[in-house]
Amino acid sequence: MNVLTDIYFRDLSGGTRFEEFISQLPAPDAAIGYFGSYDSGRLNATLQEMKTYLGERGAELNSAKRAYSMAVECFDNIRNYYSFHPADKNMALLSLTVEGNHYCITAGNSISREDAFHLRKRLEILHTLNAEELDREFLETLLLPARARAKGAGLGLILMARRKGNFVDHYFEELPHTSFFYIRIKLAA
């Protein structure tokens, strides 16, 4: 585990099958989510349910906004990077759980092997950066031409890492033609 000020990234790809890993997660106090075949409409509806839930829960406004913005970022990543292959499981996952005094945003989807390779490299770099270096990386990425940022610049990952108190787990499962990428962000509620 690499410590980035108050931020932790863990690579959970150590041979565990995704279904086994999911079954080992703690039981949440509350959960809203979708796990099934990729369906943009259902994922968007899940996102709207999360927004409603956070508003009705009476949660502290900044915490609720942080949780929702992370869910939106994860939804955008699923939509932008989802890769379909008929021989692989073509699943998508988006959920918000409440675990004690934490929100957990969980997302996952099939991505191309090439995207998985670049994402692993990006995560390796982020593992090594402290808070000041993350800020500098964020600004440098913002200054890239729009074309270079259009896909894969990693602004979302940098944003997740820059927010203090985040705990980020990630997991890759190699499938015959694609990879399944899973990310879980734990935020103080």
Image (cartoon, rainbow, N blue to C red):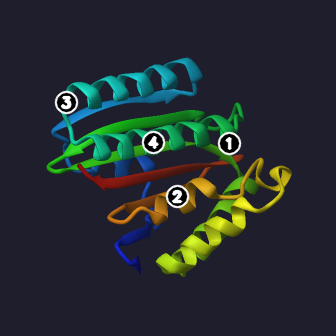
Q: Which residue is mark 1?
A: 81
User: Which label lies toward us, 1 or 2?
Assistant: 2
Quadrant placement of the N terminus:
bottom left
Q: Amino acid at mark 3?
A: Arg
- Per the image, label 3 sits on a secondary structure element best described as loop
Q: Position of residue 107 (x, y in %)?
A: 47, 43
Q: Amino acid at mark 1?
A: Tyr
For disc 4, the neighbor class at 10 Å (few under 14, some 14 to 19, many from 20) is some
Q: Amino acid at mark 4?
A: Ser
Q: Whole-Å distance between the Cαs marked 2 and 3?
A: 25 Å
Q: Amino acid at mark 2?
A: Leu
For disc 3, the neighbor class at 10 Å (few under 14, some 14 to 19, many from 20) is few
Residue at left offset 50%, top offset 37%:
72
Residue at left offset 54%, top offset 81%:
128
Q: Which residue is mark 3?
A: 57
Q: Position of residue 36 (x, y in %)?
A: 48, 27
Q: Is residue 83 left or right of residue 160?
A: right
For disc 1, the neighbor class at 10 Å (few under 14, some 14 to 19, many from 20) is some
- Per the image, label 1 sits on a secondary structure element best described as helix
Q: Earlier in the sequence, mark 1 or mark 2?
A: 1
Q: Position of residue 39 (x, y in %)?
A: 57, 22
Q: Position of residue 84 (x, y in %)?
A: 70, 34
